[in-house]
Image (tube, grey):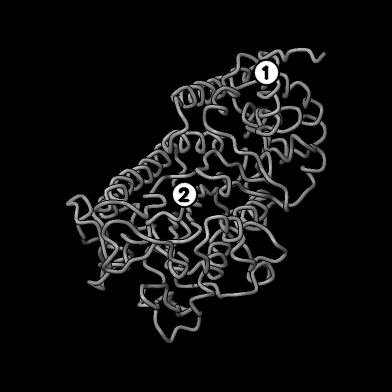
Amino acid sequence: MNQPLDQDALALSRRQMLLRALVGAGGIGLRALATGLPLSFLAHPQRALAGPLCANPGKAQFVIFQTSGKGDPINANVPGCYADPNIAHSLDPAMAATALSLGGVQTKAAAPWAALPQNVLDRAAFWHVMTNTPVHPKEPDVLKLMGAIRPTEMFPSLLAKQLAPCLGTVQMQPITVGASTPSEGLSFSGAALPIIPPLALRATLLAPTGGLGSLQTLRDQTLTSLRDVLKNGATSAQRSFLDAMVLSQQEVRAIDQSLLATLASITDNSAASQITAALALIRMKVTPVVAIHIPFGGDNHNDKGLATETAETVSGVAAIGQLMAALATAGLADEVTFLSLNVFGRTLGSTNTDGRQHNPNHQVSLAIGKPFKAGVYGGVAPVGNDYGAMPMHSASGVGAVDGDIAAIDTLASFGKTVLGAVGMGTQAINAAIPAGKVIAGALA
């Protein structure tokens, strides 16, 4: 007869597995956090002292990656969708068309977007692209830029592979802390990655032993074990560099208390909690890319008066605003970029007042961060009986019927431009994504 499972032991085992996934073998991530020393040094001290530095660290960014397999109607209410009066918008006063400035150019969007602080809008790029699918389960394919990436890889994972060496993260793989559908789960080099909800992260890192509460002990133990390397295995200049990086007991305590308070504030798996979890993972340098899900109206076929679209656009933009404020408070505004990419957008025509259908021809991605020039890239125009993304000019990103980037290549061009923004070289970009072109005008 099978013995009954010990639930306490099972829960502990899961927390331990999660902790290993988050901070690596031997708690290397926590040891880096506790000492201030680079992960590369802690993993291989002698090799790291002799090894080269990252070639382009100035452009590397952590990425908070928003995605939706539901195909939210975020595309219906952003800058670039208000020039044509036949595009349907919510009539709720909270969604009134409102003027705003992007990169010094006046445009219009639903009121929540205009309410974002100007310093956020000054880094906000709205991309009108075509994903070429109306099918929910194609979300993984869209995250692979519909086959444009060579060899086949999801875009968040391609970003992570580029960024991890420069950022010195514990792991190269992205981490998903929020997903509304199974299709939003990420893969890395073809292997499926687990979803780690905020509450699971909280339980793991607030554990009485082995979590953040052990930072000061880990600091002393790690420095003791590295004493010979720190004193004898490095040149004078290298020792000075390492000494400058080693955190004091007081500094470790400040980090300890700050992160503990942050994680203790998580009470659910909501978008706000996902943002809190993402910031904690970035502050700990666990991964270069954290995926989240912020609702923006969902699969709203039967949305009377676009009420859900209205409510979730208001709350979704507010969540982005809260994220940007939290980054500024943490001193990370220049180090973290927010990106979004959904499986598809929604139909836009004038009959779409009580719900919207799947639109394979138009999806809007958002990029907010230091590497981007604020603006509207691409545009919308009538396609069939609705609207779709326009071709783009590669120099400027302006949407135009005579653009040298076809609508079907706008998705690949978005991906290539993001890679350029975070420091990947031209030759490597073209090898990774042969289709499309980098939009030089979108780079700050």
- Judge left or right: residue 167 versus residue 333: right
Q: Which label sits in the foreground, 2 or 1?
A: 1
Camera-side residue: 93 or 285? 93
Q: For the C terminus, which image quadrant?
A: bottom left
Position of 293 relative to 409 (above/below):
above
Image position, residue 99 (x, y; %): 21, 62
What residue is rendered at 62% in x and 48% in y?
Answer: 186
Identify the image quadrant of residue 45: top right
Around disc 1, counting alpha carbons within 10 Å, would you say few (fewer than 14), some (14 to 19), or many (20 or more)?
A: some
Badge 1 marks a residue whose secondary structure is helix
Identify the image quadrant of residue 373: bottom left
Q: Which mark is residue 222?
A: none
Position of 415 relative to 370 (above/below):
below
What residue is rendered at 43% in x and 45% in y?
Answer: 294
Camera-side residue: 177 or 214? 177
Camera-side residue: 332 or 185? 185
- Judge left or right: residue 112 versus residue 246: left
Give the residue type that dot 2 points to: Asp
Q: Residue furthest bottom?
A: 402
Badge 2 marks a residue whose secondary structure is loop
- Judge left or right: residue 308 versus residue 199: left
What residue is rendered at 31% in x and 64% in y?
Answer: 79
Check if mark 2's residue and mark 1's residue have beta carbons within 8 Å: no
Q: Name the residue tied to disc 1.
A: 12
Q: Which mark is residue 334?
A: 2
Image position, residue 435 (x, y; %): 61, 75
Of labels 2 and 1, earlier in sequence is: 1
- Judge left or right: residue 218 versus residue 339: right
What residue is rendered at 69% in x and 19% in y?
Answer: 10
Give the residue type that dot 1 points to: Leu
